[in-house]
Each structure stands twice: as structure tokens, then as C-alpha cells.
Amino acid sequence: MSKSYGNFIDVFLPEKELKDVINKKIVTDATPLEAPKDADNSIVYRLYKLIAPAAEADILREKLMAGGYGWGHAKKDLLGAILTRFAAERDAYRRYMDDPGALEQRLLAGAEKARATAEKTLARVRKNLGYRA
């Protein structure tokens, strides 16, 4: 997936928008609901397998291969897996987006920490190179 092609899943979208992206942008074949699905060659299953615990991915695979379980069901499961897997990150994102001041404070704290580390590293490099100021 690539952002430049517009074929990525933004896990930070509001739930309704995320559901729309999953349902509309993930292309599936026209296999009838009753028919078995080729889970291993399905982008829905492969994404689910990356996010969900292995045992749950195996269950979804079995459901798809058995038939009577459609792509709509699998996409709903994928949405649930994304919401579960990224719940903490989504909460933090929403908190920071709702409070730009807190975000700015967090960024400044990170910059200060990086600056302190960089100064120590530069001092060590200068010493090793014999640089005298």
C-alpha cells in the first residue's frame, strides 16, 4: 500500500470513516456468500492476519474457506481487529488532536530529550576526532 496511490488505511480515522474506507476501497471478488473463499489470496484476510492474534486469524480463514461467510463479514471483522489493536493509539491521537497545547508540550519535551542526546553524541565525536573548540 502507498499513500501516493491513495490505497492505505488510516487507522486514526473516526470509526465510521474507517468503516467506509474498508468497505469501499478494499476490493474483493464476486464469490457468492455460500461459496468457499480463497482466504490466502485475499487482501482482507492478509490484513486481518497482520493485525489480529494468530488464533483469531485462523478462525477467520476457516470461516472463509468453509463458505457461508462473505467478504462483508470479513471486512467487519477487519474493522473490529483494527479498532481493538490500535485502541490505545487511537485514544492518544484523539486526545492530542483535541488539545493542540498538550501536543505542543509533548513535542517540545521530545525535542529537548533529543537535543540532550545529540549534545552528548557530538561531544563524544568531537573528543574522538580531537576537535578542540
Image (cartoon, rainbow, N blue to C red):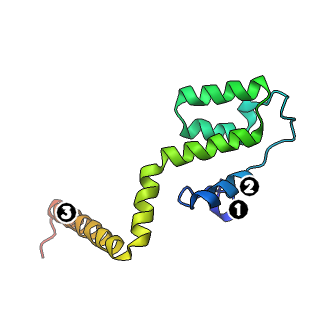
Question: Marks 1/2: CA distance?
Answer: 12 Å
* Contact, mark 2 vs mark 3 (Cβ under 8 Å): no
Give whichever of discs 2 and 3 has the lower sequence position: 2
- Write down the residue under mark 1: 5
Q: 10 Å neighbourhood of mark 1: few (<14), some, or many (≥20)?
A: few
The quadrant holding residue 69 is: top right
- Between residue 73 and residue 53, name the one nearer to us: 73
* Amino acid tagged 2: Lys
Q: What is the secondary structure assignment of the residue under circle 2?
A: helix
In this view, which residue lies farthest toward the left? 132
Q: Which residue is drawn at 69% across and 57% down?
A: 20
Question: Marks 2/3: CA distance?
Answer: 54 Å
Q: Is residue 88 left or right of residue 3?
A: left
* Contact, mark 1 vs mark 2 (Cβ under 8 Å): no
Q: 10 Å neighbourhood of mark 2: few (<14), some, or many (≥20)?
A: few
Q: What is the secondary structure assignment of the residue under circle 1?
A: helix
- Between residue 110 and residue 52, name the one nearer to us: 52
Q: Which residue is drawn at 17% across and 63% down?
A: 120
Give whichever of discs 1 and 2 has the lower sequence position: 1
- Write down the residue under mark 3: 129
